[in-house]
């Protein structure tokens, strides 16, 4: 009996001891699930190069990542957070409040959201307004706001196919949905509808219908691809990398007449493109080993350029001027203003 | 109604009931079969990996190594040149693009594999040797028949030129299928062909070990006290009800609790088996206490009374007679509780185990993932090679659960005493 108790107490002591002297020699990264596939590839290469341990990357979503990142300085807080959108003023305030006053912003590259369907379905082309009309909770018909009445694509525009509207949408927590809302739902929203919505136009335009024509499909993009394959009438949207990896199963429909392509997303002629970021805590550089080297690897030509290994898995590289800015920020550790 | 009619009616009722029972068992088995078939048909191919036989020449000049170089010098040496040279010998490529396409047939780790072979046998310098270099996941999937080749070229991940090489390799039998040792040995990777569950296995092992060390003694002592020593009154009734309630609390709640207390307040390191083990222990405690108490209750009072009658103290009667008899039930309850903890994902997501961890953890305070979390992570990955890896990991997880549950049944049947 005494043995058992002493083992137990010893065990608790060990826990207490190891954690009180806890320091980290491994970079810790949190944040967006869209940036996750790229960051992990860089991390793996970085770890294999030998000098440092492979960074640990947790996929928490952009918002969750910011919360962890801004929680404070010290080994218990992450060094880097990935983001599929720029840091919000609210998050900057949180960071400053917790002593995270110096942040380096790195633009990783661009991502285009592809609006895709099964390969077996006929090609399609939509305008942003048509997409908004198909998805919005409320639309304007003859100058009046009504609950979305469209059941078939051809109800929106006679040139569209005579098929039931069926769209798989990402859940509200995902960065892809955020980007979709701001790039398609708000931009596609008609002027009449905006003026009818009044002050809350942005929020109201982005509201997605809940009458069964738009189906929430969960964060799992692989699952969306599977669902699209089995149902050629359904559409769904996800990051460009999933299109590249699954091009034998799904294809993208054009938006405003443009197919998503590397060049189109790079120069933003494809209308649903967005930059991807990560943010680095400057206070951790020099404390946690390897951060500076990791930045160098991430922003190196062999990773980020047009023929780099990130481009192969679907990241759309930056145009050359923007690349120079990012590279300089990574080498000189330029911080952004957080006021 | 005559007597015979009534009898027939009663017999028919029984026949119908038997049929319903059989039908429900049949349906239950059918669903299990569909599930197992689905997982096995997708996952079984992950235990094999495709490799291409390549002749490697360890050129002294390209490596800048002398016979008898030290381990460190070899580790420092650049194997890139001889890797490219060896891989290009597989098929004649006419220009840079074709060379790139040829090199893409192999895993990104080809250089490391060539280096490892050399480290194992340092006499190879200046010699030629045939090595099985792992193929890239695209070729792997193609070779296993999981990737279609009858599509137009721009819809395929594999170009016509690569297909041409592949066909030649198949013809000359230089492409082979071997046992996939990487799947068990390696940590996570973004390249499906070299990704493995090694890290997740170690992470799960540590988590369950810590869970066992914490939950088992506490649960056993708590149930012995409650069952044998505690007075039966309203307070103990209240505790009993709450233990039953806790056993039914959804596991994610324990995750939230751990996030608040273990991570935010005590500041234990995130994503570690230590935190996972403590969280799972909290969750498993009530689930072990309940079967422990049941097995203590099942020991007949005559045993206790007999011990007391020959002069044993209450403590002696409990620990010398009751507990040993209740042990089989206690152990099987514990194992079933641990089996549940092994398959638990939700609380681990909250404490940061859903992380990309390449290095295999060496202590419980290194970041790590666990088996169910690995399933979750891979099911979200875009690369085709992860589909079979996901199912194969589920197979591993299922087999662990089956082994544990069998062990629980075995222990109970082998050692349990029946009281008539």
Image: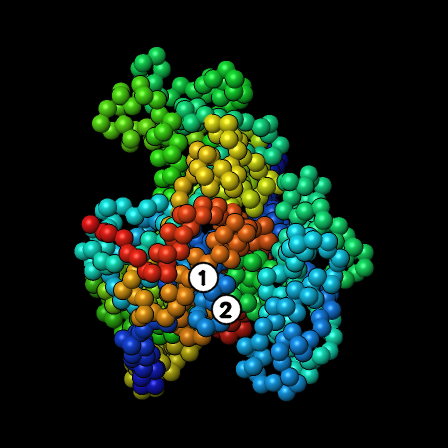
Q: Nearer the viewer, residue B286 or A135?
A: A135
Rendered position, B394 above or below A4: above
Apparent side of residue A63 relative to residue A154 in the rendered image (left or right): left
State if disc 2 and disc 1 touch (CB < 8 Å).
yes
Q: Position of residue B7 (x, y in %)?
A: 59, 38
Pointer 1 or 2: first along the chain? 2
Q: Position of residue B261 (x, y in %)?
A: 26, 63
Which residue in the rendered view is the most extreme toward the right? B172
Q: Position of residue A185 (x, y in %)?
A: 37, 30
Q: Position of residue B314 (x, y in %)?
A: 29, 81
Apparent side of residue A277 relative to residue A241 in the rendered image (left or right): left
Q: Nearer the viewer, residue A210 or B220?
A: A210
Q: Nearer the viewer, residue A149 or B129?
A: B129
On residue A49, the disc is 2
Rendered position, B19 above or below B65: above
Residue position for label 1: A297
Mark 2: few/some/many CA within 10 Å (<14, 14-19, 20+): few
Dot 1 falls on which chain?
A
Residue B125 visible, this orientation: yes
Residue B346 visible, this orientation: no
Q: What separation in Å lies between label 1 and label 2 (alpha carbons)?
A: 10 Å
- The residue positioned 50% from the left and 52% from the top of the image is A305
- The residue positioned 44% from the left and 33% from the top of the image is A271
Query: Quick check: do tags 1 and 2 share a chain?
Result: yes
Secondary element at tag 1? helix
């Amino acid at each position: 009996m005494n043995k058992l108790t002493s083992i137990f107490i010893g065990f608790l002591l060990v826990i207490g001891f190891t954690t009180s002297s806890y320091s980290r020699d491994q970079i810790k990264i949190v944040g967006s699930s869209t940036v996750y596939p790229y960051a992990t590839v860089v991390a793996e290469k970085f770890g294999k190069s030998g000098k440092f341990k492979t960074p640990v990357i947790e996929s928490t979503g952009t918002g969750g990542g910011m919360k962890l990142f801004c929680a404070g300085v010290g080994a218990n807080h992450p060094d880097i957070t990935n983001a599929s959108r720029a840091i919000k003023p609210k998050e900057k305030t949180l960071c400053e409040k917790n002593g995270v006053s110096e942040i380096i912003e790195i633009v990783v590259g661009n991502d285009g959201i592809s609006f895709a369907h099964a390969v077996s379905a006929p090609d399609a082309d939509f305008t942003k307004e048509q997409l908004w009309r198909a998805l919005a909770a409320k639309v304007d018909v003859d100058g009046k706001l009504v609950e979305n009445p469209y059941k078939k694509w051809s109800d929106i525009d006679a040139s569209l196919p005579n098929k039931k509207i069926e769209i798989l949408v990402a859940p509200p927590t995902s960065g892809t949905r955020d980007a979709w809302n701001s790039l398609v739902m708000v931009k596609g929203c008609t002027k009449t509808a905006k003026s009818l919505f009044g002050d809350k136009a942005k929020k109201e335009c982005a509201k997605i219908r809940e009458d069964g024509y738009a189906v929430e499909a969960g964060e799992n993009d692989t699952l969306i691809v599977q669902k699209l394959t089995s149902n050629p009438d359904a559409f769904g949207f996800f990051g460009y990398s999933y299109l590249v990896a699954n091009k034998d199963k799904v294809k993208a429909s054009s938006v405003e007449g443009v197919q998503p392509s590397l060049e189109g997303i790079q120069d933003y002629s494809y209308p649903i493109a967005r930059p991807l970021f990560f943010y680095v805590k400057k206070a951790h550089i020099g404390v946690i080993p390897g951060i500076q080297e990791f930045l160098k690897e991430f922003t190196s030509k062999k990773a980020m350029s047009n023929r780099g290994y990130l481009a192969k898995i679907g990241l759309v590289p930056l145009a050359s001027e923007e690349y120079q800015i990012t590279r300089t920020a990574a080498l000189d550790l330029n911080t952004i203003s957080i006021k | 109604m005559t007597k015979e009619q009534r009898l027939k009616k009663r017999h028919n009722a029984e026949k119908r009931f038997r049929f319903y029972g059989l039908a429900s068992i049949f349906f239950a088995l059918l669903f299990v079969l569909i599930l197992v078939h689905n997982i096995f048909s997708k996952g079984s191919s992950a235990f094999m990996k495709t490799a291409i036989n390549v002749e490697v020449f360890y050129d002294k000049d390209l490596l800048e190594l002398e016979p008898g170089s030290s381990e460190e010098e070899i580790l420092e040496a650049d194997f890139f040149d001889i890797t490219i040279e060896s891989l290009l010998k597989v098929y004649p490529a006419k220009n840079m693009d074709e060379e790139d396409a040829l090199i893409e047939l192999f895993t990104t780790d080809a250089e490391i594999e060539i280096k490892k072979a050399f480290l194992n046998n340092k006499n190879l310098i200046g010699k030629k040797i045939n090595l099985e270099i792992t193929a890239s996941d695209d070729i792997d999937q193609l070779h296993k028949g999981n990737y279609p080749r009858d599509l137009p070229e721009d819809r395929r991940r594999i170009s016509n030129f690569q297909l041409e090489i592949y066909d030649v390799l198949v013809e000359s039998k230089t492409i082979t299928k071997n046992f996939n040792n990487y799947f068990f040995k390696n940590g996570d990777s973004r390249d499906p062909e070299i990704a493995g569950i090694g890290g997740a296995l170690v992470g799960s092992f540590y988590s369950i070990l810590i869970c066992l060390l914490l939950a088992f003694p506490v649960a056993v002592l708590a149930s012995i006290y409650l069952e044998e020593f505690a007075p039966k009154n309203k307070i103990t009734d209240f505790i009993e009800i709450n233990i039953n309630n806790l056993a039914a609390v959804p596991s994610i709640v324990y995750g939230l609790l751990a996030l608040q207390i273990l991570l935010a307040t005590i500041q234990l390191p995130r994503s570690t088996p230590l935190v996972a083990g403590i969280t799972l222990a909290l969750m498993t405690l009530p689930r072990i206490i309940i079967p422990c108490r049941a097995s203590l209750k099942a020991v007949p009072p005559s045993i206790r009374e007999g011990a007391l009658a020959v002069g044993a103290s209450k403590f002696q009667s409990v620990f010398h007679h009751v507990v040993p008899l209740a042990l089989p039930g206690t152990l099987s309850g514990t194992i079933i509780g641990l089996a549940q903890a092994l398959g638990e994902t939700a609380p681990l997501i909250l404490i940061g185990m859903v992380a990309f961890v390449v290095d295999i953890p060496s202590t419980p305070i290194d970041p790590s993932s666990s088996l169910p979390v690995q399933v979750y992570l891979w099911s979200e990955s875009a690369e085709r090679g992860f589909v079979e890896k996901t199912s194969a990991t589920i197979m591993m997880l299922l087999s662990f659960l089956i082994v544990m549950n069998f062990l629980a049944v075995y222990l109970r049947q082998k050692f349990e005493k029946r009281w008539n």
